[in-house]
Every structure is written in structure tokens, then in C-alpha cells.
Amino acid sequence: MSAFNVAKFGGTSVANFEAMSRCAEIIANNPQTKLVVSSACSGVTNILVELANGVKDESQRAQLINKLRTIHTDIMSQLNDISSIKQRVEALIDKVATLSEAASIATSAKLTDHLVACGERMSTHILTRLMQERGINAVRFDIRGVLKTDSKYGKAEPNLNATKQLATERLVPLCQQHVVVTQGFIGSDADNETTTLGRGGSDYSAALIAEAVGAAGLEIWTDVPGIYTTDPRIAPNARPIPEISFSEASEMANFGAKILHPSTLLPALRHQIPVFVGSSKAPQEGGTWVRQSVESAPLFRALALRNNQTMVTLRNPKMFQAYGFLADVFTVLAEHKISVDLVTTSEVSVSLTLDQTDTCGGAPELPAQAQKELEQLCTVEVKQGLSLVALIGNNMSETKGSAAEVFDTLDAFNIRMICYGASPHNLCFLLDEDEAKQAVKALHEELFE
Ligand code: ADP
Ligand code: ASP
Ligand code: MG
């Protein structure tokens, strides 16, 4: 069988009956699309996360579950024949109710994953049925039988070999006969327990599945016609980028551009799978192609913003002209499996930011025991409520005047930490969360408009 496309539809793309109908049209219009990866309907994962975090009040819990029921029954009520899916969706709502009650007594990462996975499990039942009613030969497939991960609930890492083998055995043959509809975001560990890849993980799922089946292309259908110079919700004059390199788009995703989950492009890059990002609301508007090599490499390509940053500043006057301090600090961090994102150092201090969190969200915390151990080496200051702004481009650190242009624009802002020079492709800085959008707007105006 010749290679086919994998198409991923995000939450807003499957938010309601009309949105799902547009997805079906996009799929029907491209016979090369044989595998569809769907998110939960818009808003559903947020409700499930809230329930997983433990809602003690019974009536409040019932209200949230009712909201979930309404989202799904509203779509089903517009289908012609739901006899094949009605009971399955209802069973999942019942499961959500039971698991939410358990979470109201004691929460756990494993329970959270079981609970939040229900969103994608429900949406795919409905999307499959809707596609069948549009004459598409669609079947639903439970991706937990293929996408194998470790047991790091809430932010599981894929087992690429196992996933590839199972995809070849179970998924590829099915795609020869049908258009297969499956879930983003979820997987299963070696004990077949449900896991998730972290918030926004459907993009990553789609890329992993595309890699595992050897897809010809990966389509990411969302609510904007492509990757923009920055989030169009922040800067209304942001414009779509027709073509962008894997490395530039990866940097954007890594630094928080919500349009793509940070890991999405790794599998695509490994297998040189071209990625298209477009709007399911307006497919005719085109979108962005992400490829290995592209024609232009502008000095400034895009701006990304990531909220919920935690900065840890470690000070030790004895560090001046001494050695071993950084090694000691990073040993403590490594022992506690704390992943560090950005680092800057001075003679007597080091500031670092902690890596992003899992499905439960929120700012990353420095574990109390790690803090205690660090305090034996130095003073420790933890600051939250910060945002990271990243300017992504090409050869920035080798181009005269580029930093001056950026920092002149930022004159009025209180910059907390700057990382510049380590990578020629980005310049990033931390500032207070309430100033961050303004800073992105100002920089966008100056550098892109
Ligand atoms: P989906 O549910 O389809 O995965 P997301 O909400 O996760 O969609 O991502 C799409 C959103 O990402 C857009 O609506 C936009 O607000 C935001 N976004 C952030 N940065 C960018 C960017 N550089 N280009 C386009 N959209 C961006
Ligand atoms: N439904 C999940 C979330 O909202 C995964 C995704 O949509 O990508 O985070
Ligand atoms: Mg997303």
C-alpha cells in the first residue's frame, strides 16, 4: 500500500456538530487521508482535569458531569442513527462520574490519566459515526493498543519501537480498508494502563502515529490558518507564515507557541514527514508547510510566549572563583529528576527555570526536599508568576544590532532573566506575567509589522 496521510483535528475542530461536519468534508476531499487523530471536544479536557483534581462538592461535580453530557449529546442529537454509539458514550460518562468520585477522595496521576482519557474516547465515537453518515468508510480504533508509553502518568514518553511494531501489525492493515479514526493525547504503558502525553498532546500523538505508520504527510487542522508570526490572539496584526523549517517551528513549539505541542516535530523530523498546519474552519485559506529546508531564513521569524514559569535563583558568595558549585547544584536537581529549562549564571549566582508540567497544569514546583538540599549549598529563592518570551529567528547572535533592536523596544519592561547567544536561533527573556502580552505586542510591532 502506498503511503497515506495522517490528519489531526484539535478540540475546536471537533467542538460541535458543524465543526465535526467540516472535518468530515476535509477528510472526504482528500483520498490520501487514511488515518484521523482526534482531540476531545473543545472544553472537555479542562472539565476532566478539574474533576481529576478532586471536586469535593457533590452537586458541583454533578454540574460538571452534566456539562460533559450536554456537549456530547448535543452532537449526537443531530446524527441520524446513534444506536451503535449511544451506549458506549453513556458508559464513558458513567465512568467519568465514578472516577471523579474517587478523585474527590484521593487524587493520583494514574487516576487523572484514566479520567482525562475519556474525552478523546468519547469524541472519536461521535466523529466516526458522523463520518460514516457522510458516506466515509470510517472505523474507530483504540490507540491504546498501539501507542505504548512508559508509566510517567500525565507526561508519558513514547516507546517508539513497540509503537512502530504494533502500528505495523494492527493499524496499517486497517488503513488499507478504512479511514481509521483514533484518539490523540492517550496511550498505554507496559501493563496496559492508560497514560497521557501532557496537555495539547494530540499533536504529538498524531506525529508519533505518522512516524509509526510511515505516513507521507501529517496534517494538523486547528482554528487558525497556519503558524503565525505570533499568537494572533495577542497581536492582531500577526500574519501566517507560508513555509517554515522544522528547526524554527520546533523552537516556536518549545517556547510555548500553543499551535503545536513542543514535541510534535521530533517524529516528523526523524522521518522527514512534511507537516501542514491549517484551519478546519477555513481550509481554503491554506496554511503553513513545515519542512526540512525552506527558501527563506529571515533574521526574525516569530515570537512565542509561555506562561506559568518558575524561576529559581541560587546564590553563594563562595562561588566566586571557586569550582564545583554548579556541579553540586545540578546533582541535587538530577537526583530529584527536576528538568531545567533555561539557565543563566553570574559570578556568585545561578538562575534557572523549571521545565513545564504535566496534564494537571500549573506552574512547576521546586519539591520541598530538593529545596532543603539546595539550601545546604546556597540561598534559594523561588519566584512564580513569570512568563517567558522567545524571539525565534536565524543567525541572531551573529548579526550586529539585532539585540539592540530588541532591547530598545523592551526599555519600559522589567526583564528578569535573559538567555542570548547559546543558540543562534533564539533570544529569550523572563518577565512578570502581567507584562508579557504587552511585551510581545510591542516587539511584534517593532520587528514584524
Ligand atoms: P487545537 O485545539 O487545534 O490543538 P490549540 O488551541 O491548541 O488548537 O492551538 C491553536 C491556537 O494556538 C490558536 O488559536 C492561537 O491562539 C494559538 N497560537 C499560539 N501561537 C500561535 C502562532 N504562532 N500561530 C498560530 N496560532 C498560535
Ligand atoms: N485534549 C487534550 C488537551 O486538551 C489534548 C489535545 O487536545 O491536544 O490538552
Ligand atoms: Mg493544541
Image (cartoon, grey):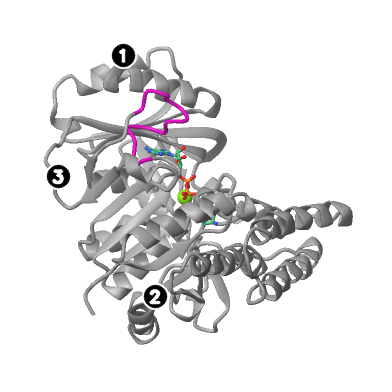
Vertically, is 347 above or below 4? above
Res. 322 image quadrant: top left
Q: What is the C-alpha distance between the residues marked 3 and 2?
A: 31 Å
Give the mark, 3 or 2, whose residue is nearer the N terminus. Answer: 2
Residue 53 shows in the view: no
Task: Say which residue appears at 34% left-offset and 18% top-offset.
Answer: 445
Q: Amino acid at mark 2?
A: Asn
Q: Quadrant of the N terminus?
A: bottom left
Q: Which residues are magenta?
A: 225-238
Q: Which mark is residue 167?
A: none
Asked which secondary structure carries label 3, the reply is: loop
Q: What is the C-alpha distance between the residues marked 2 and 1?
A: 46 Å
Q: Work out whether residue 150 or residue 418 is closer to the camera in this orientation and state it.
A: 150
Q: Amino acid at mark 1?
A: Asp
Q: Which mark is residue 159?
A: 2
Q: Work out whether residue 117 or residue 171 is closer to the camera in this orientation and state it.
A: 171
How far across and how far down the image is residue 2, in percent? 21, 75
The residue labelled by disc 1 is 408
The residue labelled by disc 3 is 294
Give the mark, 1 or 3, whose residue is nearer the N terminus. Answer: 3
Q: How many marks?
A: 3
